[in-house]
């Protein structure tokens, strides 16, 4: 039942868009992907709990870092659906994300440090390319296609 207290705790899609700086269409998209949730009021209008603003902020920051929405959705599964996340909830999410971010930072650092080897070459040699096959380690695994990501 909607009470005067609940009315002020819930936001319309337009209010969420205005407060988060995210387009209404993006909010609808996030909802279809399970990143955020709303419910319908008696007039069949979407209503969002206020804590959705924190989720949207987290989604936008993660997207700016290049994290795919599927990974964001997986991380958000650890947060409660029925209440605002507590500091402990955020700490768990942060610990999980820190490991992923450390790995991403490592990969980007390798890319940055090895990118100079390709400038001017243009060949992306499968034997000598410092980005795709550093030290020709894949050639040592035998003929045929190989996974090109480092372990």
Image: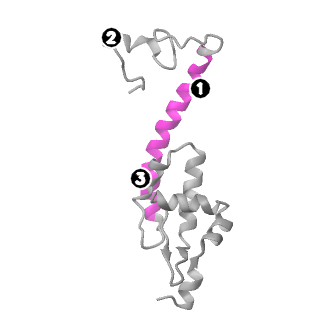
Q: Earlier in the sequence, mark 3 or mark 1?
A: 3
Circle nearer the viewer, 3 or 2: 2
Residue 81 in the image, given as x and y percentages of width and height:
42, 68
Q: Secondary structure at mark 3?
A: helix
Q: Which residues are magenta?
A: 88-117
Q: Secondary structure at mark 2?
A: loop
Residues at badges 2 and 1 in contact (C-beta under 8 Å)? no
Residue 30 magenta-drawn? Answer: no
Residues at badges 3 and 2 in contact (C-beta under 8 Å)? no
Q: Secondary structure at mark 1?
A: helix
Residue displayed at 68% across by 67% down: 18
| Secondary structure predominantly adopted by residues drawn in magenta | helix
Up-down relation of residue 123 to residue 23 (above or below):
above
- In the image, 99: left or right of 57? left
Q: Earlier in the sequence, mark 3 or mark 2?
A: 3
Residue 91 in the image, given as x and y percentages of width and height:
45, 58
Which numbered marker is on residue 112? 1
Which numbered marker is on residue 143? 2
Q: CA distance from mark 3 to mark 2?
A: 36 Å
Residue at image mark 3:
74
Up-down relation of residue 27 to residue 131 (above or below):
below
Q: CA distance from mark 3 to mark 1?
A: 28 Å
Residue 7 in sight in this render? yes
User: Could you say which quadrant of the image residue 112 lies in?
Assistant: top right
Residue displayed at 42% across by 73% down: 82
């Amino acid at each position: 039942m909607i009470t005067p207290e609940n009315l002020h705790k819930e936001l319309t899609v337009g209010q969420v868009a205005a407060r988060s700086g995210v387009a209404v269409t993006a909010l609808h998209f996030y909802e279809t992907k399970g990143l955020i949730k709303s419910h319908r009021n008696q007039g069949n209008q979407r209503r969002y709990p206020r804590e959705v603003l924190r989720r949207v902020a987290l989604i936008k920051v993660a997207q700016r870092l290049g994290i795919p929405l599927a990974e964001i959705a997986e991380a958000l599964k650890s947060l409660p659906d029925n209440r605002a996340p507590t500091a402990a909830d955020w700490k768990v999410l942060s610990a999980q994300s820190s490991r992923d971010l450390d790995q991403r930072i490592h990969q980007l650092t390798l890319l940055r440090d090895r990118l100079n080897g390709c400038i001017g070459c243009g060949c992306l040699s499968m034997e000598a390319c410092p980005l795709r096959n550093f030290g020709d380690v894949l050639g040592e695994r035998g003929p045929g296609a190989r996974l090109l990501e480092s372990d």
